[in-house]
Amino acid sequence: MPSVLVVEDDPSIRQSLIEVLSEHGYAVRSAADGFGALREVTQTPVDAVVLDLGLPDLDGGDALRMIRGISSVPVLVATARDDESEIIKILNAGADDYLVKPFSGGQLVARLSAVLRRTSHVPPTGAAAGAPVATAAEPLRATVVGELAVDPGARTAYLAGRELRLTRREFDLLAFLAHHSGQVVSKRRLLSEVWREPYVDDQTVDVHLSSLRRKLGERAAAPRYLLTVRGVGIKLVAPR
């Protein structure tokens, strides 16, 4: 049974789309905003995404670019925006098709089926819901924490839709902390697994953490994502 993520902020429209797709044999999940969509895409693979552009937290175009940064899942944009230049921009940004509201359930199902046939998308198998898992033969996977999206494969990081300009080491540090989000990681472990150099001291970690905080728009005295657990280490969390 193909799985579809419906991203639509209007509850009545979202429910209608869910019902239509469910009736045609799709397993449907939904999200009401852009960051909810990113979390869904990174945590549990789907075969396709139906994406509205008028989202409350992110412009749908930005959400599309962020999804493209972390996944090759087919995306069918379904929106009221019918300007030709907008359609061209969204298709160039990575959408697989574009459907203008209002449209019938039959048209939606036909377009979605066509997208899946063209892309021959096969979802990854063996991925459990929740935090990404890495092995020695498998790189860290994309992770979303709050409004922060980190993709080690593409080496990109976005905060609230804005790409962060990070040095190589800053990115490696952020990606490692994001992969272990919610866990306290000691500086010794960071030196061992991120730096992989025997003669580096704790101050090196402190300098990079300080720079990373600035780029995340926070300070050690007023942290949002990077919380220091005194005497233990650092952990990356979603802001409350």
Image: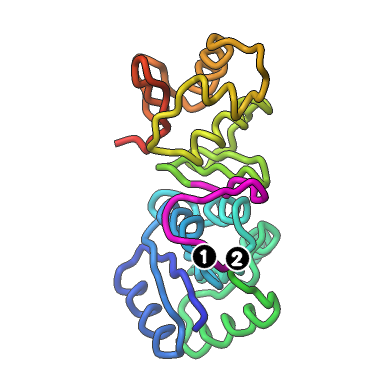
Depicted 192 relative to depicted 23: above or below: above
Rendered residue at 67%/46% (across/down):
154
Rendered residue at 50%/51% (across/down):
132
Check disc 2: other Cα within 10 Å, few if <14, some if 14-19, many if 20+: many
Quadrant occupied by the C terminus: top left
Which colouring convention does the figure follow?
rainbow
User: Is 129 colored magenta in this rendering?
Assistant: yes
**Whether label 1 touches label 2, CB < 8 Å:** yes
User: Residue 201 at x, y = what percent?
Assistant: 58, 10
Query: Which residue lies under the disc numbered 2?
Result: 73
Q: Secondary structure at mark 2?
A: loop
Mark 1–mark 2 distance (CA, rounded to whole Å): 8 Å
Rendered residue at 36%/61% (across/down):
32
User: Residue 188 at x, y = what percent?
Assistant: 52, 20
Q: Secondary structure at mark 1?
A: loop
Quarter holding residue 229:
top left
User: Residue 65 at x, y = what percent?
Assistant: 60, 52
Q: Which residues are magenta?
A: 124-143
Residue type at tag 1: Pro
